[in-house]
Amino acid sequence: MDRGMPGSTSRGRLTVDVRHQAGSAVVTPEGELDHHTADLFSDALERALADGGSRLVVDCAGLEFCDSTGLNVLLGARLKAEAAGGGVHLAGMRPVVARVFEITGAGAVFTLHDDLDAALANVAEA
């Protein structure tokens, strides 16, 4: 059962929406994820996890940039989600964002999907 839209927060170049859909917490960052905005993203992920969302789907389609700080936030969320019996699925990464994951090898520790619908279908089957 979907619980609607718990809320969006914004700071400068980043807006983050958190909602529940298909049994998962869906976190949607839009804009630039870097050392100036990472705490906003981290807070949204923490909120999603605290609300029982150990199955996180991050819809990256609107993410225009992600630096190592943003990557570290995602890696931390992954550890917390897995400790709670869930995981983090990343969906719809633009090539510029995917490149950070390729360079660092972090793409190997996340489940990557072409788009949000594919991620939600995969998480629902798990």
Image: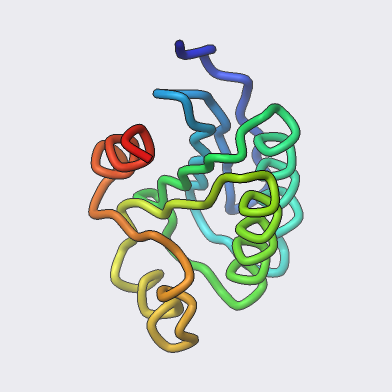
Q: Outermost residue toward the bottom?
A: 103
Residue 118, position as x, y percentages in the image: 24, 42
Q: Residue at x 30, y 42 (%)?
A: 122
Taking depth in this image into account, of 96 and 98 the one nearest to the observer is 98
Q: Please indicate whether residue 50 sits to the left or right of residue 106 in the image.
A: right
Q: Is residue 87 above or below residue 122?
A: below
- Left or right, 2 with respect to 116, comes to right
Q: In the image, is residue 74 above or below residue 98?
A: above
For the C terminus, give its image quadrant.
Answer: top left
Question: Residue 121 location in percent, x, y?
Answer: 27, 36
- Residue at left offset 49%, top offset 31%: 24
Q: Position of residue 95 (x, y in %)?
A: 29, 71
Q: Nearer the viewer, residue 99 or 106?
A: 106
Residue appearing at x 39%, y 60% in the figure: 111
Q: Residue at x 45, y 84 (%)?
A: 105
Q: Based on the displayed image, in which of its 4 quarters is residue 102 positioned?
A: bottom left
Coloring applied to the structure:
rainbow
**Numbered circles on residues, count:** 0
Which quadrant: the N terminus?
top left
| In the rendered image, the vertical position of residue 59 relative to residue 32, given as above or below | above
Position in image of residue 42 (x %, y %): 71, 52
Q: Is residue 76 or residue 44 the one in the foreground?
A: 76
Please give left or right for residue 24 compared with residue 79 in the image.
left
Judge whether 60 appears above or below 26 on screen. below
